[in-house]
Image (tube, rainbow, N blue to C red):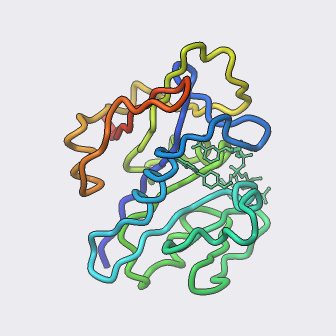
Amino acid sequence: EHKPTISIVVAALKPKYGIGYQGKMPWRLRKEIQYFKNVTSKTTKSNGINAVIMGRKTWESIPKKFRPLPDRINIVLSRSFNNETIDDSVIHADSIENGLKLIKGKNVDKVFIIGGGEIYNSVIGSELVDNLLITEIEHTDPETVPMDTFLKFPEDKWVKQPKSELEKFIGEPVDENITEGDYAYNYTLWTRK
Ligand SMILES: NC(=O)C1=CN([C@@H]2O[C@H](COP(=O)(O)OP(=O)(O)OC[C@H]3O[C@@H](n4cnc5c(N)ncnc54)[C@H](OP(=O)(O)O)[C@@H]3O)[C@@H](O)[C@H]2O)C=CC1
Ligand SMILES: COc1ccc(Oc2cccc3nc(N)nc(N)c23)cc1
């Protein structure tokens, strides 16, 4: 069984890497949402499937009719969960390690940690995480964008890869310098130094 790569995938507003406000994302970037759906769903492994790992609060803020996120195994983390497989697409676990144990044998290709703030910041220091897929967002006046959740990642421990490496990881070309309203953003891949 090949060991799946584990990547954080997040959209963050520079320079403070803000990611949320009052339980929501402070922006709605249509092409960026498409990128997120495509990257986390696309698998190059024959009859493979990807898994997404999220915190209980992020799961609860997905409207019932839209969860689980389709075409991906959804692993939800809560300290009060027993480790159990709920159905073909949903797994409950009390840690990432225990969640990963429950997907063994399911032909999982890539694993993506999709939020939220507490999950990101509790795993970003862990050796478990191989890649950071950060959509780096810029704004004409970032201080005017309301934020209360920030990605705390040690920039000295990670190195931003060239776009060619990101495209290799995803398996297709990516746009650059995308603008939507007052936002401009680029997709990036970071690996450990
Ligand atoms: N910009 C972006 O790309 C994204 C931003 N976000 C933003 O993040 C915010 C939501 O994040 P947040 O409120 O922190 O909630 P999370 O989605 O991170 O969920 C937090 C819950 O996850 C569980 N949990 C956290 N750490 C662990 C751990 N180490 N082991 C087991 N369970 C754990 C706990 O559940 P319990 O309490 O049940 O024990 C905790 O209460 C929102 O603002 C959302 O918009 C979310 C996704 C993407
Ligand atoms: C409320 O549920 C969710 C909230 C956020 C979420 O993650 C995202 C949603 C939309 C776009 C996203 N873009 C990137 N780069 N990373 C994420 N994790 C995203 C996924 C589910």
Q: How many marks?
A: 0
Residue 133: x and y in percent read 41, 44
Q: In which quarter of the image is the C terminus?
A: top left
Residue drawn at x 33%, y 41% as measured from the top left? 191
Residue drawn at x 71%, y 60% as measured from the top left? 62
Residue drawn at x 63%, y 86% as measured from the top left? 87
Depth check: 34 or 48 in front?
34
- Above or below, comparing residue 113 to residue 13 in the picture: below
Q: In which quarter of the image is residue 161?
A: top left
Residue 18: x and y in percent read 61, 29
Left or right of 134: which side holds 95? right
Q: In which quarter of the image is the N terminus?
A: bottom left
Q: In which quarter of the image is residue 81?
A: bottom right
Single out the residue that lies furthest toward the front: 181
- Above or below, comparing residue 160 to residue 35 in the picture: above
Residue 163: x and y in percent read 25, 37
Residue drawn at x 58%, y 45% as measured from the top left? 120
Residue 125: x and y in percent read 51, 41
Depth check: 26 or 118 in front?
26
Left or right of 187: which side holds 102? right
Left or right of 142: which side holds 164? left
